[in-house]
Amino acid sequence: DILLGAQAQAGLLPVCDHYSGVEVRMRKSLALQAEMTDEFGEGVWYADLAPISQPDLVTVTVARALGLPDQPGASTADTLVRFIGDRPMLVVLDNCEHRVNVVAGLVQALRDGAPGMTWLATSQTPLQLHAEQSYRLGTLEVPEPSASLDAARRCGAIALLEQRARVVDQRFA
């Protein structure tokens, strides 16, 4: 937390994890988002890039995550720059691996025009940006085959499975 706070003050993010699975990265980025809300006066924003199939939709997806409508006569990137400007905020870009080049270009362009923004990008592949710092996240703990039900439920992989199952069916216990 201290390291991340210092990086945020220096504007050194994005942080890119290119080792762990999608679920671990997502859980870590969401936990970080919750922790960092007080650090950024204009809030913490989350953009899931996993469903993006066309490169030109990355910028639009980020704008929508920030609640921005289309601005006739202005590019989406320009709209983002004008909206963000010097406002202190954190934008979490999740699942960047399938659009690394587009995300890297967007982050680079907006870093120059929107100095108040800090980026956190999760990806299996680094964005290759100046001052980018990568962190390896461990995988979720898996129980031993002989583990009791209670012990298994304390493992991250089982806890995530239960959490996801309850979203689909509240009766899951």
Image: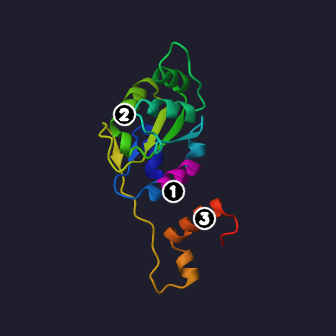
Would you place residue 169 above or below residue 125 in this image?
Answer: below
Q: Where residue 48 sits: x, y (%)?
A: 50, 43
Which mark is nearer the camera, 3 or 1?
3
User: At x 54% / y 51%, what residue is drawn?
Assistant: 30
Q: Where residue 96 sits: x, y (%)?
A: 40, 43
Q: Give the range drawn in magenta.
A: 26-35
What residue is pinned by disc 1? 27
Task: Determine crowd level at label 1: few under 14, some 14-19, many 20+ residues with C-alpha closer than 10 A.
Answer: few
Colour scheme in use: rainbow
What residue is pinned by disc 3? 165
Which mark is nearer the camera, 2 or 1?
2
What residue is pinned by disc 2? 102
Q: Kindly indicate the quadrant of the structure image that contains residue 89.
A: top right
Task: Determine crowd level at label 2: few under 14, some 14-19, many 20+ residues with C-alpha closer than 10 A.
Answer: some
Please name the amino acid that badge 3 sits on.
Ala
Mark pair 3, 2: CA separation:
33 Å
Task: Determine crowd level at label 3: few under 14, some 14-19, many 20+ residues with C-alpha closer than 10 A.
Answer: some
Q: Where residue 127 sits: x, y (%)?
A: 33, 41
Overall secondary structure of the magenta section: helix
Please name the amino acid that badge 1 sits on.
Arg
User: At x 51% / y 68%, what residue is drawn?
Assistant: 156
Please name the amino acid that badge 2 sits on.
Val
Mark pair 3, 1: CA separation:
16 Å
Q: Kindly indicate the quadrant of the structure image that contains residue 169.
A: bottom right
**Is residue 87 or residue 95 the one in the foreground?**
95
User: At x 54% / y 85%, what residue is drawn?
Assistant: 148
